[in-house]
Amino acid sequence: MEIRKGIAVSPGIAIAKAMVIDSRDYRIPRRSIMASQRASEIQRVRKAFARAIQELDDIKSAKRIEESKISDIFAVHMRFLRDKSFRKRITDLIYKEMVTAEYAVSTILREIASHFAGIDDPYISERAADIYDIEKRLLKHLLGRVEDNIEHLRDEAVILAHDLTPTQTAGFNKSFVKGFATERGGRTSHTAIVARSLGIPAVVALGDLSSEIPPECQVIVDGNRGVVIIDPDEETLRQYARYAERVTQFVSELNVLRELPAQTRDGVRVELMGNIEFPDEAEQVLEKGGDGIGLYRTEFLYLYGGSEPTEDDHYHAYAETIRTMKDKPVVIRTMDLGADKMPHSSWHPNETNPALGLRSIRYCLQDLPMFKTQLRAILRASVLGDLRVMFPLITNLQELRQAKMILRDVMEDLDEYAVPYNADISIGIMIETPSSALTGGLLAQEADFFSIGTNDLIQYTLAVDRANEHVSTLFSPAEPAVLRLIRGVIQDAHKARIGLSVCGEVASDPEFIMLLLGMGIRTLSLAVPMIPEVKQIIRSVSIEECGQLARRAAALDSSRQIKNVLRDAALKILPENF
Ligand code: PEP
Ligand code: MG
């Protein structure tokens, strides 16, 4: 039995057999073979191709894949795998240069991928990502690694991986993937956010992990305490089974709060909205008793499917969400690609420092056709309900004005074709940089609402990469600098009488709820599974005691002291929850 401590990113307990996914980018070393081994290496290549084709056939025939947009990616892969000239290049290399099958596969596929990536046609350059995928698939068969085999899961498993992309995580089938643990990552990385949305228990930043796991061994993922237990003994398994039962019971007890308002003991109503990545999560927001959707991360539309979503793809996703939510508000955030949310293709440039690069609204403002496509869809959907639009990562007034000007251009286009839309659509921005937080007074003159994105605000204020486990202890919403910026934004928004919410992960952190209320926040947008617990906290406190706590925190000078004070306060209110 081995106990490992990491960062708890998604609550819950998972107990199941381990499934190790090796998603590192392997460089295959050049190894020479003897002339007599050439035939057997070529035979290995044939077998790997045959297995890869069989595997794709199996996946394609599974209904789940057929119905999804992933099916066209599989079709592209299949075409490559069946292409004889492509296979011949690999076998020729083995024959002429006397190298191993894996080296030949990797070399030829990477050559083709980099050739595609350099072509100035998005359709072709996007195929580079497919070629890398095919390389991985073939290498898996050649090297016998269990890699990306999640598609085949037919038994419950806990996924263990070096790292997972947000897209991989979003593709997990909850019936089989009971939890996951990764060597890398941070609490506010997008992979963690997706795990919380799906309600899959997860622990990240465990350090070297996957190489030590015996195949098929049992693993416990404790997403509440950030602990992973590999190969637990009988007694630990028993204790955890009991603990898991208590956690499940706690969650079901909270469900009774569904119909009750998120109202403090002294009668102040707080709005609890859900953060979603996919339209089908809207249903869950209602199930959990949410008041609307405060953040729809639309970039996930771009992360799936291998190509840019069309205007209709956008429209259908938004229309479905609004229909589910009926008259409740839905805040659509325009796409926020870049940094740790990279499209599955090469239409985004390679950057040395992507978090400070062409991401989010900057990317949109440089690619107007793409931006306008999304805006048209948002405007078309705006007549279906209470739809609001929000621009991410606005750093100054200039950017906000540009984004609004483009929105107006799109409105004029729609006017020309007499397409109906809501001309008074509410336009908000995310406050996620010190720059926007410090100029909230200016921005508030031209925005209808602010939403404080604490994940990025903390990252950019403290210069701490939100997804980097090596600096994760430095990433804290309780840092005095962060709290001062948030306080300033609250004052500016209140002064200008515009809407205000907090939609970063801090809004789903039970220990921070009292502080946020005490600072003046009345709308929280958070991970959907956490809505009942946060509601319970809100219903257990008074605004007066929250205000006192916020004033105490403001007088302290270190993150550690502030966290201790918050924890003590939370423990007093609901001892059994903490
Ligand atoms: C944030 O930065 O706090 C936020 C909510 O946006 P995202 O996590 O998608 O970057
Ligand atoms: Mg952000």
Image (tube, rainbow, N blue to C red):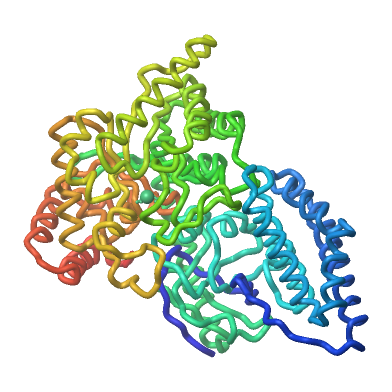
Kindly tell me whether residue 402 is visible in this rendering: yes
Left or right side of 377 for 205: left
Left or right side of 566 for 335: right
Who's the residue at 14% across and 69% down the image? 558
With respect to residue 210, does 263 lie above or below?
above
Total numbered badges shown on the rendered structure: 0
Q: Quadrant of the C terminus?
A: bottom left
Residue 251 image offset from top left, x and y in percent: 45, 58
With respect to residue 149, does 170 lie above or below?
above
Q: Which residue, as the protein is rendered here, is positioned at the far front?
A: 96
Kindly tell me whether residue 158 is visible in this rendering: no
Who's the residue at 27% across and 30% down the image? 447
- In-front residue for pair 99/178: 99
Q: Quadrant of the N terminus?
A: bottom right
Who's the residue at 50% across and 10% down the image? 416
- In-front residue for pair 118/395: 118
Left or right side of 407 for 95: right
- In-front residue for pair 237/438: 438
Residue 191 image offset from top left, x and y in percent: 49, 60
Residue 179 image offset from top left, x and y in percent: 56, 67
Q: Which residue, as the protein is rendered here, is positioned at the far left?
A: 555
Residue 324 image offset from top left, x and y in percent: 53, 32
Who's the residue at 65% across and 46% down the image? 305
With respect to residue 390, does 343 lie above or below?
below
